[in-house]
Image (tube, rainbow, N blue to C red):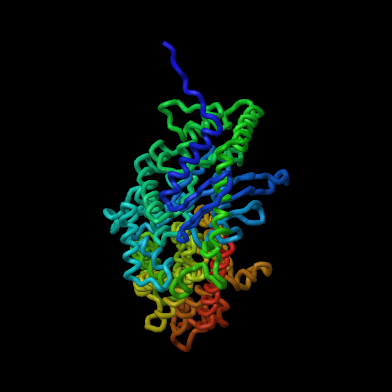
């Protein structure tokens, strides 16, 4: 009995089949392509949708070692129509993320050649009509699913959309993404048990598509998810895209067969060049025609990647030739010819339908942000305050730590007394109050770095600008840092037995609070410049240690080497320490030591006052050279240093790329 093997389809048959796949799909999205004698005569594009086409895209970088130009992607062309979902696939390092970034307008245009068309017009700002979903599940863990999505809606819808309408939109997107069951559950973080990984990913995507951008770019949306969660995530995206005729382009790494079957189009890339672009359903036949038939029960996605991955080939030259054969086959294939026809179709649609404005040009004077500066600041401040209140790691754990420290200091320095021998004890209490509190401000680094991930995503997607975020970060820190300073002062001040009186108490609290504000500002500035936990922690610890050394407690100001005097005068701990010292000592009287044998009064500081055998706090200040201290001026110096660090924080966020 003979077994008849099915012959490979001819190029003409394959082209007809691919065209059939395209026509079946385009009927669903109301784009008609009629091919008559190889000329496109009738194309209609829905004016509420955006097609993406690109031709001859090449992205070039300069190798830092060799100083040679290298093409990361080369001569890539393709098209995705409204309602289509396209997967960009390839081995690691093939260029799929680079291609996605170039299409999304996230690469320096100076390094890009070729043309990207939106509805057939080139030179337009794709960010105007798109969103970019990163791999990270960047969400506020202390907020609920609904609150995270509502925040996006509040900032991304224009002011003409009422609060009731925004809430309705949020409810609809929650339903579309299957998040109704967990809508009012907190997302979760390292201390709050929250929703599952798949639900987090859907929440991230839902928050970015709540305004229904015409184009959705997704960077490996299923990474880190199990097969069931990955399928649910992609199913939710595709349901929304089909319902609203959105254009979806996703880079994806080794999808399951179920997830792979959800895509309409496939873009395979290897070594930065196209090896296949066309309908997903036609890819099996295409690979068969070029001599690579997929086994019957294999996952097609895995099979394609195995054929175009040469990383594990022992002979590099053979591997390069293998990939070059794929590239050459594609360039001369019917699949490539159909892509060119589709690109021509999109271009022809714009030219022919001149009466219908299909352009997505950025209007003159357009602001990429839907809301103004103060509205942005309001919503960011509201969310940041909610996060700070709910997330005990941000401030509350520090409040508890400082209460414990206050009790420790209060018991060690209990009622320190007003004798000559207690002078050094008082200085030590003042120094430790400032030094330890500001040093432990490093506890704020993890919270900021967690928030920074969310900031990067939201800023890149045009939720808000840097200014409102930097201002909101400062505004929210003001009351919480005050709570920390007040709590410590309320316990430690009376237990240590510092200068009684409301005015002196308030000066102590003021200086401690302002010192903490400078320290908090320095922490976020350093973390913004170097957003790596260990590195930021090390630098902040070094700076605080350095400021401790030159503040004037360990080494008196007159003894500090001339080369380091400048550091003493910019040291925020100096101003806080000296302010607290003066507010405590000023107006106090201390007992000198009386020699039992001679009954003479021995005073280390100043002269005995009459027959009282005592000296004043002013005598102590004079002895240590603290004669020029002006309490209001020293407080203003701390305010000025806070402003300097906050401006630096803003500049660091502005200068740092939105994607790193």
Up-down: is 521 above or below 530? below
Pinpoint residue 635: horizontal percent, then vertical percent: 50, 79
The image quarter in which residue 186 lies: bottom left
State the quadrant of the C terminus. Answer: bottom right
Name the side, left or right, on which 169 lies relative to 536: left
Describe residue 550's horizontal placement relative to residue 129 as left or right.
right
Q: Which of 384 and 410 is in front in this view?
A: 384
> In the orientation shown, which residue stands out farthest toward the top?
1
Q: Is residue 445 visible?
A: no
Which quadrant is home to the N terminus?
A: top left
Question: x%, y% of residue 222?
Answer: 42, 44
Tell me residue 650's x, y (percent): 54, 68
Q: Residue at position x 58%, y 41% from top?
A: 337
As drawn, 185 above or below 37: below
Residue sitting at 72 percent across and 45 percent down?
Answer: 68
Q: Residue furthest front?
A: 37
Q: Which of 109 and 536 is in front in this view?
A: 109
Q: Which residue lies furthest to the left in this view?
A: 181
């Amino acid at each position: 009995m003979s077994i008849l093997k099915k012959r490979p389809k001819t190029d003409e048959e394959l082209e007809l089949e691919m065209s059939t796949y395209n026509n079946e799909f385009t009927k669903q999205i109301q784009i008609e392509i009629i091919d008559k004698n190889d000329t496109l005569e009738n194309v209609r594009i829905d004016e509420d949708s955006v097609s993406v086409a690109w031709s001859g895209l090449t992205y070039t970088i300069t190798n830092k070692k060799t100083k040679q130009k290298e093409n990361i992607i080369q001569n890539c062309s393709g098209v995705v129509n409204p309602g289509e979902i396209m997967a960009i696939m390839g081995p690691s390092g093939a260029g799929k993320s680079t291609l996605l970034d170039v299409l999304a307008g996230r690469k320096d245009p100076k390094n890009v050649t070729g043309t990207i068309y939106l509805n057939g017009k080139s030179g337009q700002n794709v960010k105007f009509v798109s969103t970019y979903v990163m791999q990270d599940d960047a969400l506020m863990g202390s907020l609920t699913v609904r609150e995270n999505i509502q925040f996006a809606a509040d900032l991304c819808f224009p002011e003409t959309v009422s609060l009731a309408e925004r809430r309705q939109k949020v409810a609809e997107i929650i339903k579309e993404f299957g998040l109704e069951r967990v809508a009012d559950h907190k997302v979760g973080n390292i201390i709050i048990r929250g929703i599952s990984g798949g639900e987090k990913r859907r929440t991230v995507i839902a928050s970015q598509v709540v305004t229904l951008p015409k184009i959705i770019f997704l960077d490996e949306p299923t990474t880190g998810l199990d097969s069931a969660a990955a399928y649910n995530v992609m199913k939710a995206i595709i349901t929304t895209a089909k319902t609203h005729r959105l254009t979806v382009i996703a880079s994806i790494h080794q999808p399951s067969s179920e997830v792979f079957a959800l895509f309409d189009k496939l873009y395979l890339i290897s070594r930065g060049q196209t090896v296949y672009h066309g309908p997903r359903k036609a890819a099996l036949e295409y690979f068969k025609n070029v001599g690579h038939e997929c086994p019957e029960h294999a996952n097609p996605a895995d099979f394609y990647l195995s054929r175009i991955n040469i990383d594990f080939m022992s002979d590099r030259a053979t591997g390069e030739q293998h990939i070059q054969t794929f590239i050459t086959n594609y360039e001369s294939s019917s699949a490539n010819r159909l892509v060119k026809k589709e690109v021509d179709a999109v271009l022809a649609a714009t030219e022919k339908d001149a009466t219908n404005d299909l352009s997505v040009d950025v209007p003159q004077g357009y602001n990429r942000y839907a809301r103004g500066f103060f509205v942005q600041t309001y919503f960011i401040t509201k969310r940041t305050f909610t996060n700070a209140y709910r997330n005990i790691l941000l401030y509350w754990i520090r409040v508890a730590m400082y209460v414990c420290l206050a009790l420790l200091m209060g018991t060690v320095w209990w009622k320190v007394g007003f004798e000559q021998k207690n002078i050094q004890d008082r200085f030590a209490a003042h120094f430790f109050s400032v030094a330890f509190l500001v040093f432990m401000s490093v506890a704020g680094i993890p919270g900021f770095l967690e928030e920074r991930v969310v900031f990067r995503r939201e800023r890149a997607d045009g939720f808000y600008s840097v200014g409102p975020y930097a201002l909101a970060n400062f505004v929210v820190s003001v009351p919480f840092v005050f709570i920390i300073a007040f709590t410590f002062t309320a316990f430690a001040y009376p237990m240590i037995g510092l200068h009684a009186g409301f005015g002196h108490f308030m000066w102590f609290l003021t200086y401690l609070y302002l010192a903490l504000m400078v320290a908090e500002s320095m922490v976020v500035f350093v973390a913004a410049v170097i957003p790596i936990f260990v590195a930021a922690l090390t630098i902040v610890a070094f700076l605080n240690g350095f400021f401790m050394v030159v503040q004037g407690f360990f080494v008196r100001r007159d003894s500090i080497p001339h080369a380091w005097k400048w550091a003493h005068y910019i040291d925020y701990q100096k101003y806080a320490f000296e302010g607290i010292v003066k507010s405590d000592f000023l107006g106090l009287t201390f007992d000198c030591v009386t020699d039992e044998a001679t009954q003479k009064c021995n005073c280390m500081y100043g002269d005995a006052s009459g027959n009282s055998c005592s000296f004043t706090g002013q005598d102590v200040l004079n002895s240590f050279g603290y004669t020029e201290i002006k309490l209001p001026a020293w407080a203003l110096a701390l305010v000025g240093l806070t402003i300097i660090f906050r401006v630096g924080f803003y500049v660091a966020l502005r200068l740092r790329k939105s994607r790193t």
